[in-house]
Image (cartoon, helix red, strand yellow):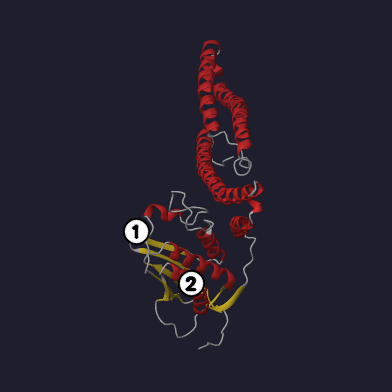
Amino acid sequence: MAIKLRKSYKFAFRSSLFITIFITALFLIFLLIVENQYWFYALPFALLCFAICFIVLQIRVERFIYRRIKKIYDDVSLLESSTFSSRPVTTDMKTLTEEIEKFAEGKKIEIDTLKIREEYRKDFLGNVSHELKTPLFTVQGYILTLLDGAMKDKKLREKYLQRASKGVERLIYIVKDLDLITKLEVGGLKLERTDFNIIELIQNIFDLLEMKAAQKEITLTFDMEYENPIYVNADREKIQQVISNLLVNSIKYGSPNGTTEVSVENLIKNKVIVRVTDNGEGIPKQHIPRLFERFYRVDQSGSRSEGGSGLGLAIVKHIIEAHGEKIYVESEEGVGSEFSFTLEKRRTNLPEQH
């Protein structure tokens, strides 16, 4: 309880004072009527009466109010077993009101958060079912067709089995991505940090995606000629996945005869920033805040013509954050998009390679 004078004390004090004044006045009147010489007994009587009234009233008020307030604390503690229940019970109405209001505000925030999470959960489950449904029905359709008699036709059997196999591969791709992002979210994926040349890694990815980019008539290039290597400290395999996902996205949604440009710049003393910039169709502003959500797609029509698991950007974000770094996106419709992320420079003094 608070050390300062509580309101219950004030109540008992004032009540005792009023009762004492009233009873003492009656006692004085009685003494003046009966015996004039005994009037000096009024002061001791008043003090004794005040003390008795104060003690009785304080005890009664404490017990009367405390029992009811204690029940409120106990009821609230059923909902909040940590901070609220550990506090001492106070009979100060102002303090109690403030604590209850603070508790109610905290619960309102929790409820709002739970509502947001519930909406996210519903969206996520809907997206998962949608992503899995298409390849599952595809595989089921081809297998049922084969069982219904198409198996006898060798050419048709081979064609349908190949298509069913592609459907299974897509399912495996989605499940692997889900497994990876789950590990990243719970911190179950260990990073194998090494010092490596980020320029060399990007060039290797350019070579791997050269044919895919050529099909869309998109050029993959650096913003300038990097004569010297730039060493960073990170998980090489995971950063390769990040850059590959960003480049694949730029190819998918890039404009024919377009360009995807990658740059690596010094940010601060121990950081570099990698930028992937394209001149594609761009992203509407209302979609940017949700780009890194699992299965979120800018194209809400349900079209899956471009393929992919819908987890690419979510995985990119989690990998970068697992490194303790940040990822950024800027985009304008009809102009293009830029994804950028930071990395730590190398920790050891490696000899430069030319």
| Mark 1 crowd level (few <14, some 14–19, many ≥20, 10 Å Cα) | few
Q: Is residue 150 left or right of residue 264?
A: right
Task: Specify which label sits upstream in the sequence, 2 or 1.
Answer: 2
Q: Is residue 63 above or below residue 306?
A: above
Q: Which mark is residue 333?
A: 1
Tell which of 157 and 199 is nearer to you: 157
Q: Nearer the viewer, residue 82 or 167?
A: 167
User: Tag 1's secondary structure?
Assistant: loop
Question: At 52% from the left edge and 31% from the top edge, which residue is drawn?
Answer: 10
- Which residue does the image show at 60% across and 48% down from the upper left? 141
Mark 2 nearby-residue class (10 Å; few <14, some 14–19, many ≥20): few
Residue beneath disc 2: 211
Q: Amino acid at mark 2?
A: Met
Q: Secondary structure at mark 2?
A: helix
From the viewer's side, name the closer residue of 14 and 296: 296
Residue 285 in which image quadrant: bottom left
Residue 235 appears in the rendering: no
Question: Residue 143, which numbered label?
Answer: none
- Which amino acid is tagged 1? Glu
- Quadrant placement of the N terminus: top right
The location of residue 236, given as percent across then percent down, is: 58, 73
Residue 345, position in %: x, y?
52, 76
How far apart are the two marked residues, 2 and 1, measured between alpha carbons?
A: 27 Å
In the depicted view, which residue is nearer to us: 255 or 35?
255
Which mark's residue is nearer the viewer, 2 or 1? Answer: 2
In the rendered image, is residue 9 in sight? yes
Left or right of 68? Residue 32 is left
